[in-house]
């Protein structure tokens, strides 16, 4: 462990630190009560460091490699602190693992009286009022949509009496359901305490449960939403907490960046126009002037987004000097202003209309932020085209200032943890990315791995691989991967930085490889993982979604192959804007952000291989730049100490010795 922390001279703190050893130590509660439990000194060290931070109102950054048992360590520390603590994870899947697996383990074996609650975004819950409104105006063009609504209505009758109103209660509800999007709770349509259904609101019930527990499990997106709501003075999303633990913190900046951004498209504006018509009719407000303005908004929205319909690439920065964009944006903004004035001056003061007026204002800000030239210094703005659908986006170039004012200055004690936070033995990149610099001086701890990478792994870089820019890269990539798979007898993840490379190599190998080949995109991710675990010698070809959050233990996964160093695409709108900003300040963005981002991504990908002390396998990187470029040293300094070879014969001997 680096970044040594001295315990403060406080008997109460010292006593609680001792309790961590009584629970996680070699002769502790967990070792006595759980068969086969292995004591890990790194887990004990983490539990002590987290507890000290929570009780001393400090901020802590702690990297805990795979196998540390970091979840149990920080859960024990959180309970011992006696404080109300929010725990934020990267995804809903990780949330559910924490709440339904890890916390029950703690309750069963250590703290039987522990109370915890799971909080999700409001989009997971049905809204009573929106469902009623939808049924009064719905129309269906596909038979399956009518059948899905009938299924939802049957479920709704049950959940209204004894359920949570959570979409997970519905079997086989599609992730992108048009029906669900029309009836779920949304922040923009919520009437709060003015709603007649407030007392039985499923979102409100979730909050009430979370108000009376010690641990509240949230995700990064919900946490960002809470920060935004609190700063606007509109209340809170998460009940007040004393301290915050941010798990999977390597993804925190990206989640906050997306949530603090603005995202809009024609569909959103047309949905708004439809809602306006319905609410005005419900309020018995009729008149040609309203209809004329709504038609103008619809037309101006089509004109604005129609400018980008011929876009030939998937993403492109918005040109704020384009007169067509400026004129279309001004026309749309003026119509939104007119509609706001008309609604605000109406003698009908129903809460729905007040909510509608607020939505108009929010849309006006959104359109001006995305398409207005004045926001260019603070936001990265771009157009995205996917499946012929055009959407527009604006995300903050830096989230540090917002995090400092909305989070760090409000919550006295924070813990950031992940298996991948440090680059080259330093947290400098992470601190900078989330604004933990300047006046903030967090404690820092880097834990060593509990695994013996020198004995359990071999790091292989083929001699024959050229740099990725070579025309021979993909053919030789396929050839080398085929040779590696014949040695490992399949049992591999082949992880790519691009879909194009993945598909090209798959096509070249599918006829010559006898092992079961699984390709990302052909089936849901969960199904592919299940098949990989169940089929002998399976090989999974995947891109970014398989680089993290996937846990396969044992011989089923004996090799991880990475096609090239995972540098983010240089034309990514947010990254390129940040690069330009650093370059204009005379700094080197390549070493300040691009290399550290790639190092963390590579650590995530290679981290799929060794999950227990019994796992063995080969880590293969097909990119020679890790050896030939000056920045390659930072990659090696950040990886676990696996023996390096450039000989496939050594790989074969490594696997033969395991048989």
Image (spheres, grey):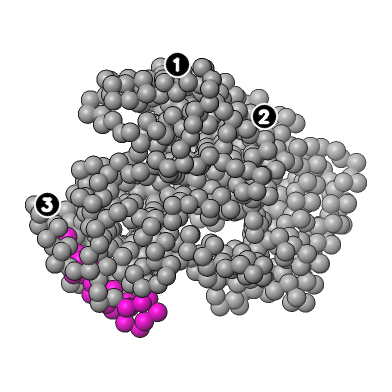
Mark 3 or mark 2: which comes first in sequence?
A: 2
Report the magenta stretch's main SS. Answer: helix
Residue 379 shown left or right of residue 141 in the figure: right
Task: Residue 127: tell me if it is visible.
Answer: yes
Depicted 325 relative to depicted 178: above or below:
below
Quarter-of-image position of residue 112:
top left
Q: Are marks 3 and 2 in contact (CB under 8 Å)?
A: no
Residue 159 in sight: no
Q: Quadrant for residue 192, please give it.
A: top right
Q: Nearer the viewer, mark 1 or mark 2?
A: 1
Mark 3 vs mark 2, CA separation in Å: 63 Å
- Stretch of the chain drawn in magenta: 466-488
Pinpoint residue 253: horizontal percent, then vertical percent: 56, 51
Q: Residue at 73% across / 30% down in the picture? A: 193
Position of residue 453 measured from the top left corner of the image (x, y, whole percent): 26, 50
List x then y, in percent, for residue 420. 43, 49
Q: Which numbered disc flags the more N-terminal residue, 3 or 1? A: 1
Viewer-nearest of discs 3 and 2: 3
Residue 658's disc number: 3
Q: Is residue 617 above or below residue 320?
A: above
Which residue is tagged 1?
A: 113
Is 487 colored magenta in this rendering? yes
Task: For marks 3 and 1, give the CA distance.
Answer: 46 Å
First in sequence: mark 1 or mark 2?
Answer: 1
Q: Secondary structure at mark 2?
A: loop
């Amino acid at each position: 462990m680096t970044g040594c922390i001295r315990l403060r001279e406080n008997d109460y703190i010292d006593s609680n630190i001792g309790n961590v050893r009584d629970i996680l130590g070699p002769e502790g509660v967990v070792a006595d009560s759980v068969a086969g439990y292995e004591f890990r000194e790194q887990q004990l060290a983490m539990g002590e460091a987290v507890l000290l931070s929570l009780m001393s109102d400090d901020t802590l950054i702690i990297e805990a490699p795979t196998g540390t048992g970091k979840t149990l360590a920080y859960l024990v520390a959180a309970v011992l602190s006696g404080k109300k603590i929010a725990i934020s994870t990267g995804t809903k899947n990780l949330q559910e693992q924490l709440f339904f697996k890890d916390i029950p383990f703690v309750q069963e074996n250590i703290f039987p009286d522990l109370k915890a609650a799971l909080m999700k975004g409001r989009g997971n819950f049905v809204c009573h009022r929106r469902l009623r409104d939808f049924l009064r105006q719905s129309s269906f063009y596909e038979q399956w949509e009518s059948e899905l609504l009938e299924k939802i209505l049957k479920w709704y009758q049950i959940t209204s009496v004894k359920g949570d109103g959570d979409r997970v209660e519905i079997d086989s509800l599609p992730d992108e359901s048009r029906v669900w999007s029309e009836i779920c709770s949304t922040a923009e349509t919520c009437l709060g305490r003015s709603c007649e259904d407030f007392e039985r609101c499923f979102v409100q019930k979730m909050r009430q449960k979370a108000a009376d527990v010690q641990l509240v499990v949230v995700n990064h997106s919900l946490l960002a939403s809470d920060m935004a709501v609190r700063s606007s003075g509109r209340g809170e999303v998460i009940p007040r907490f004393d301290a915050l633990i941010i798990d999977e913190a390597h993804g925190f900046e990206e989640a906050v960046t997306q949530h603090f951004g603005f995202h809009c498209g024609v569909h959103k504006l047309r949905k708004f126009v439809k809602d306006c018509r319905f609410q005005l009719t419900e309020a018995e407000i009729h008149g040609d002037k309203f209809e004329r303005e709504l038609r103008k908004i619809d037309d101006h929205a089509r004109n604005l987004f129609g400018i980008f319909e011929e876009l030939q690439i998937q993403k492109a920065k918005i040109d704020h000097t384009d007169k067509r964009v400026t004129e279309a944006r001004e026309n749309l903004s003026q119509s939104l202003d007119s509609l706001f004035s008309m609604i605000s001056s109406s003698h009908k003061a129903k809460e729905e209309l007040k909510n509608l007026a607020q939505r108009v204002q929010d849309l006006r800000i959104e359109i001006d932020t995305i398409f207005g030239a004045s926001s260019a210094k603070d936001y990265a703005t771009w157009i995205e085209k996917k499946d012929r659908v055009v959407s527009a986006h604006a995300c903050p170039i830096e989230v540090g200032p917002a995090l400092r004012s909305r989070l760090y200055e409000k919550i006295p004690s924070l813990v950031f943890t992940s298996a991948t936070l440090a680059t080259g033995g330093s947290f400098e990149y992470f601190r900078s990315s989330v604004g933990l610099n300047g006046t903030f001086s967090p404690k820092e701890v880097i834990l060593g791995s509990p695994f013996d990478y020198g004995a359990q792994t071999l790091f292989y870089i083929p001699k024959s691989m050229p740099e990725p820019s070579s025309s021979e890269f993909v053919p030789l990539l396929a050839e080398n991967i085929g040779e590696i798979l014949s040695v490992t007898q399949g049992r591999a993840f082949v992880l790519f930085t691009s879909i194009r490379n993945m598909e090209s190599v798959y096509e070249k190998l599918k006829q010559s490889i006898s092992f079961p080949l699984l390709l990302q995109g052909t089936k849901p991710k969960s199904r592919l993982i299940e098949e990989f675990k169940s089929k002998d010698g399976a090989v999974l070809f995947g891109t970014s979604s398989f680089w993290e959050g996937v846990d396969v233990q044992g011989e089923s996964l004996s090799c991880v192959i990475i096609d090239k160093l995972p540098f983010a695409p240089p034309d990514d709108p947010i990254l390129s804007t940040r690069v330009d900003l650093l370059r204009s300040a005379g700094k080197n963005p390549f070493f300040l952000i691009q290399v550290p981002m790639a190092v963390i991504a590579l650590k995530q990908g290679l981290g799929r291989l060794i999950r227990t002390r019994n796992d063995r396998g080969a880590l293969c990187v097909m990119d020679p730049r890790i050896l030939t470029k000056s920045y390659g040293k930072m990659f090696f300094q950040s990886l676990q100490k696996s023996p390096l070879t450039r000989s496939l014969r050594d790989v074969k001997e490594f696997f033969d010795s395991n048989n």
